[in-house]
Image: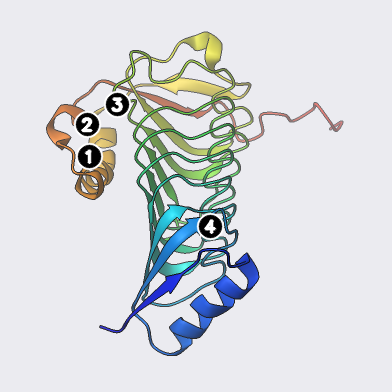
């Protein structure tokens, strides 16, 4: 396996991303970026079978339009990791800013701790093979899954008395599913969202994602594989029909 190490200290994001692309063109299968401090757009539009380890704080739009690679962030992440990602995996050993998994249309994003506002906004999917998945170990802030059109958001709430306390969960949701460990109060649901039963079928669906999350972060999945979850789904396919147009 060809491995490349890059010291990103003091490098603007544009030449840094050019160096990453050149390494991939030269056949690198593993790229280690050290001293990353907020450089944006890492791995954007990147294709291929390559693993990028980011030691530091990744800047905004990590993995945007990415199609296949794996990014491992040993630190926190700025806004919108996984923005419009097609395929691949992003693993964040920390927390992320707002709009994590923004418009994601495939692949998986695992966040060990918390995410900011509007996580999973406008996630979408095309049949089962292009189904994006966002797994959050801690909690999420307001408007989780806003305008969600497909995919799965799973919030595990590890270490939290209440998994989510901010309002607007699933505002405008018209596809996909949000699953939160524990109870979710009705008053924090957004317009167009409703709760439904969590059953054996849903437990079977989330089990591989819980196990993969625990594998990435060295946790025991046994306490997370039970029926203590709340499902949130669309109340309709057109939650705002009639609000902006007349029919």
Q: Nearer the viewer, residue 182 or 246?
A: 182
Residue at image location 45% in from the left, 51% down from the top: 132
Is disc 4 surrounded by few (<14), some (14 to 19) or many (20+) residues within 10 Å?
many
Q: Which of marks 4 and 1 is in front?
A: 4
What residue is shown with label 3? 158
Structural distance between the alpha carbons of marks 2 and 4: 35 Å
* Mark 2–mark 4 CB contact (< 8 Å): no
Instruction: Name the residue that disc number 2 marks.
Output: 200
State the CA–CA distance, disc 3 to disc 1: 20 Å
Quadrant assignment for the C terminus: top right
Instruction: Kindly indicate whether the residue at mark 1 contacts the one at mark 2 (C-beta within 8 angstroms).
Output: yes
Q: Choose between 192 and 101: the one closer to the eye.
A: 101
User: Residue 28's quadrant in the figure?
Assistant: bottom left
Q: Which of marks 4 and 1 is nearer the N terminus?
A: 4
Which residue lies under the disc numbered 4?
A: 62
Q: Percent position (x, y) of residue 197?
A: 34, 22
Q: Is mark 3 on a helix, strand or loop?
A: loop
**Circle 3: is it few (<14), some (14-19), or many (20+) Cα within 10 Å?**
some
Locate residue 123, reporting x and y percent. 55, 46
Q: Quadrant of residue 178?
A: top left
Callout 1: helix, strand or loop? helix
Mark nearer the N terminus (3 vs 1):
3
Relative horizontal placement of residue 66, taking residue 240 as reference (left or right): left
100 relative to 55 in the view: left or right: right
Q: Nearer the N terminus, badge 3 or badge 2?
A: 3
What residue is rendered at 56% in x and 72% in y?
A: 16
Marks 3/2 in contact by CB < 8 Å: the verdict is: no
The correct choice, above or below, for 51 with respect to 134 in the image is below
User: How far, Cα to Cα, is label 4 from label 1?
Assistant: 30 Å
Q: Indicate which label's residue lies in the foreground, 2 or 4.
A: 4
Q: Name the residue under label 1.
A: 204
């Amino acid at each position: 396996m060809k491995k490349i190490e890059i010291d990103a200290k003091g490098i603007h994001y544009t030449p840094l991303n050019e160096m990453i692309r050149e390494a991939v063109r030269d056949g690198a299968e593993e790229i280690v970026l050290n001293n990353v401090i907020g450089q944006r757009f890492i791995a954007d539009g990147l294709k291929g079978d390559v693993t990028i380890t980011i030691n530091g704080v990744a800047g905004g739009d990590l993995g945007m339009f990415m199609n296949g690679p794996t990014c491992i962030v040993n630190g926190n992440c700025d806004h919108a990791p996984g923005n419009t990602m097609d395929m691949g995996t992003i693993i964040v050993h920390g927390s992320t800013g707002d709009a994590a998994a923004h418009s994601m249309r495939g692949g998986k994003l695992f966040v060990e701790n918390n995410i900011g506002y509007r996580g999973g906004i406008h996630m979408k999917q095309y049949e089962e093979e292009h189904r994006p998945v966002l797994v959050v170990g801690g909690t999420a802030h307001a408007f989780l899954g806003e305008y969600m059109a497909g995919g799965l958001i799973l919030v595990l709430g590890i270490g939290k008395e209440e998994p989510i306390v901010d309002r607007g969960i699933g505002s405008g949701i018209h596809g996909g599913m949000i699953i939160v460990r524990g109870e979710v109060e009705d008053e924090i649901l957004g317009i167009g969202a409703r709760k439904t039963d969590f059953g054996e079928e849903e437990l079977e669906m989330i089990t591989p994602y819980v196990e993969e999350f625990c594998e990435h972060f060295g946790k025991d999945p046994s306490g997370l594989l039970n029926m203590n979850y709340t499902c949130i789904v669309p109340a309709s396919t057109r939650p705002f029909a009639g609000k902006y147009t007349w029919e």
